[in-house]
Amino acid sequence: MQKQKSNKAIEVENTREVMLFNQAVIDQRYVYRIFKRLFDIIASLAGLILLSPLFLVLAIWIKVDDPAGGVFYSQIRLGLKQRKFKMYKFRSMCTDADEKLKNLLKYNEVEGAMFKMKEDPRITKVGKFIRKYSIDELPQLWNVLIGDMTLVGPRPPLEREIKDYTDYDWQRLMVKPGCTGLWQVSGRNSIGFHEMVELDLKYIKKSSVVYDLGIIFRTVKVMIMPNDAY
């Protein structure tokens, strides 16, 4: 006998059929976009300069831990209006991590169009530490400086993830992707894909300079006192 869906589940499904945003309206937020870009440039440049000693220490640590691979890892992601760009991270996995992924997809621990595995065997020793404190994401300050990303916004998806996107899900790509956002400060890996989309759309709806600063403050707090990042 097929189990009937609850009224709450049906309500969520119905909500996901309603398009919330229009790209033209979002593009017309000129003042906010100018202030956001100016802040991105100043903050990312300052961050890259101030954190350069830390970057040097991490580079040495990563090479000592796994000499076979490079210090940085780049990956093609989709940004604003599905534009492809190369996103940078400190390498936290073995050199053949992408090849090993296809054999691990069956162990995915989150629902929807993304992959997360708490005991991922591809992660190096130093990788566990820098991922826990989100230090591996710091090179994305370069992506922010050159305009591929912004400090606060939805996380950019992989090309393989978007094949399962609905029109509703595509709305999260109506704004520039960010280094941090509501997903990262609201539970991160304990949150499924659909919940992540809802948080992204909530951010797009409420986004402002003050709202962005609040998320940045919460992000710093999470980096110092990590949630369940892995």
Image: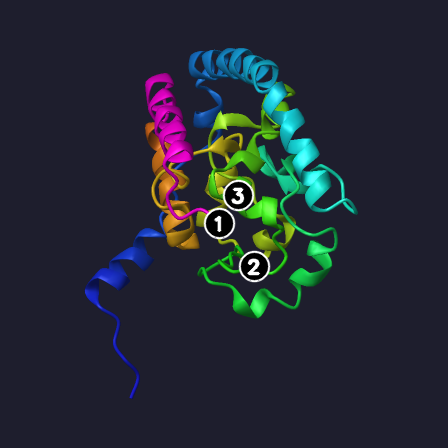
The residue positioned 46% from the left and 20% from the top of the image is 28
Asked whether the viewer can see residue 225, the reply is yes
In what element is the residue under mark 1? loop
Residue at x-position 48% and y-position 49%: 230
Is 142 positioned to the left or the right of 223 in the image? right
Assess whether residue 25 is covered by the magenta stretch.
no
The residue wearing badge 3 is 129
Question: From the viewer's perspective, is 87 left or right of 173?
Answer: right
Give the magenta part as a residue range.
Answer: 207-229
Q: Which circle marks residue 230 in the picture?
A: 1
SS for dot 2? loop
Q: Position of residue 90 (x, y in %)?
A: 64, 37
> Marks 2 and 3, how far apart in space?
13 Å
Between the residue at mark 2 and the residue at mark 1, the CA separation in whole angstroms equals: 9 Å
Q: Residue most toward the front?
A: 64
Numbered label attached to residue 120: 2
Crowd band around label 3 with a 10 angstrom C-alpha radius: few (<14), some (14–19), many (20+) = some
Q: Quadrant of residue 201?
A: top left
Q: From the top left corner, tell me how far across and down residue 229 is, in percent.
A: 44, 46
